[in-house]
Amino acid sequence: MSDFPRRRIPEAAVARLPMYLRILIELTAEGTQQVSSDQLAQLAGVNAAKVRKDLSYLGSYGTRGVGYDIEYLTYQIQRELGLNQSWPVVIVGAGNLGQALANYGGLGGRGFNVAGGVDVDPSKVGSVIGGVRIRHIDDLTNIAQSKSVSIGVIATPATHAQEAADQLVRAGIGSILNFAPVVISVPRHVRVRKVDLALELQILSYYEQMRSKGLRAVPDVADGQTA
Amino acid sequence: MSDFPRRRIPEAAVARLPMYLRILIELTAEGTQQVSSDQLAQLAGVNAAKVRKDLSYLGSYGTRGVGYDIEYLTYQIQRELGLNQSWPVVIVGAGNLGQALANYGGLGGRGFNVAGGVDVDPSKVGSVIGGVRIRHIDDLTNIAQSKSVSIGVIATPATHAQEAADQLVRAGIGSILNFAPVVISVPRHVRVRKVDLALELQILSYYEQMRSKGLRAVPDVADGQTA
DNA sequence: TGATGTGAACCCATTCACAGCC
DNA sequence: GGCTGTGAATGGGTTCACATCA
């Protein structure tokens, strides 16, 4: 109501906003107050025009001839990403990875809190990891509903990932971050993002192999950087 | 020489090959021997035409009217990605994340092995994690060169990530997988991929927020799935 | 007949280049 | 003068649709 739903932002741009946000927060920590699209592009390793276009989707928050006010821009990006609230997330799987995630303190400052963790293993149920009590997976729906959780993280072995996904969907979760190295299938309205260590490494190995074969591979762009 | 450098594969296609590979390996485990682009697309949650085009970059390894021979296709993808050899990787940072990575057994079967781990903290140096002895970061160049490591993983806190990147570059590493939540800058010839939990969650929160505002957000595509 | 392989069309994303404003 | 904001141009990736072949 107060902030009417502005035009939809292209997916690719949305994916970069968190990166800009992080950089802005770092700049604030260093005491900087203004930043130009050129500087920001430099720090993010992308093209300056891209920065300006991305930011323009939020509205016209820059000042011509000057740049962007960091504090104001930070606020706008956070608002756009929905980070003016703290999102409760639930973690499925309390093995190595699940524990690492629960212990990872970095989430609090970035708009999230771990509302709970679940596992199938009875020996894990009841333990407390990173301040989070692990409950049985059958409690998932309870937890999700009582704490209004809409984001779930799958940190199970590959063999149980689909099961975990099904449970999350049944619990009414709308977005899933999948750390298990398998493709999970979910109803179309559920959004999934996947993080897979080996998969990332395999992409890198392709280019390393190209390099070793003497092909200059590509001039490199991707997550661009400066020396 | 034996396999002459075929035309370069588009970046987006390269990024999907590991996913196909994993699915093919799963199918093999289930005893399947043939697969069509339709089936594969279904399992990967992408369009069938995309599967065919992606695979066509490798060469014409399918049989019209039949599909793809899984074993043969698996071999071809592995070869293309350079996975017919095992790539040694070095992990910088032996904290929570670094330990989780070293302990993660899944790498061996997917074309990688942990050649070593390093840290700055003297109390960590000398310990053995996941079968890997942690050494001091000053040994990085030694390790990298003696074991021909070309891929490095940054698992340090954000504050030390740039430092770690510099050391890796100095050690002659060509590709970096960065788990630290900062953008690192490296010379142009070094390839970087970034994995950031909070960043992924922040992307999801954008769409959850859209949803909660009643905007049907997007019809969803991304890592597509079937119900 | 049935599924691949691929030109062509389409669509989204990136980049250019400059008008507009401070 | 300097930097934003954005139409227009470009480029890459996706999808269509069909010729091709087992």
Image: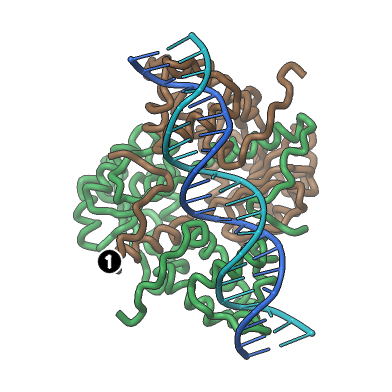
Chain colours: A green, B brown, C blue, D cyan
Question: Quadrant location of the N terminus of chain B?
Answer: top right
Question: Quadrant location of the C terminus of chain B?
Answer: top left
For the point 55% across and 19% down, the residue is B61
Residue type pointed to by label 1: Gly
Q: Height in image: B80 above or below B10?
A: above
- Element type at mark 1: loop
Quarter of the image where one finds residue A174: bottom left
Of A116 and D7, the residue lying toward us: D7
Q: Height in image: A72 above or below B96?
A: below
Q: Height in image: B80 above or below A91?
A: above
For the point 80% across and 49% down, the residue is B170
Quarter of the image where one finds residue A164: top left
Q: Where residue B108 appears, x then y in whole percent?
A: 56, 29
For the point 74% across and 54% down, the residue is B186
Q: How many badges with numbers are in the image?
A: 1
Would residue B117 be found to the left or right of residue A181 on screen? Answer: right
Q: Chain of mark 1?
A: B
Residue at mark 1: B214
Is residue A31 something that shows in the picture? no
Tell me the crowding category of disc 1: few under 14, some 14 to 19, or many 20 or more residues within 10 angstroms, Cα based. Answer: few
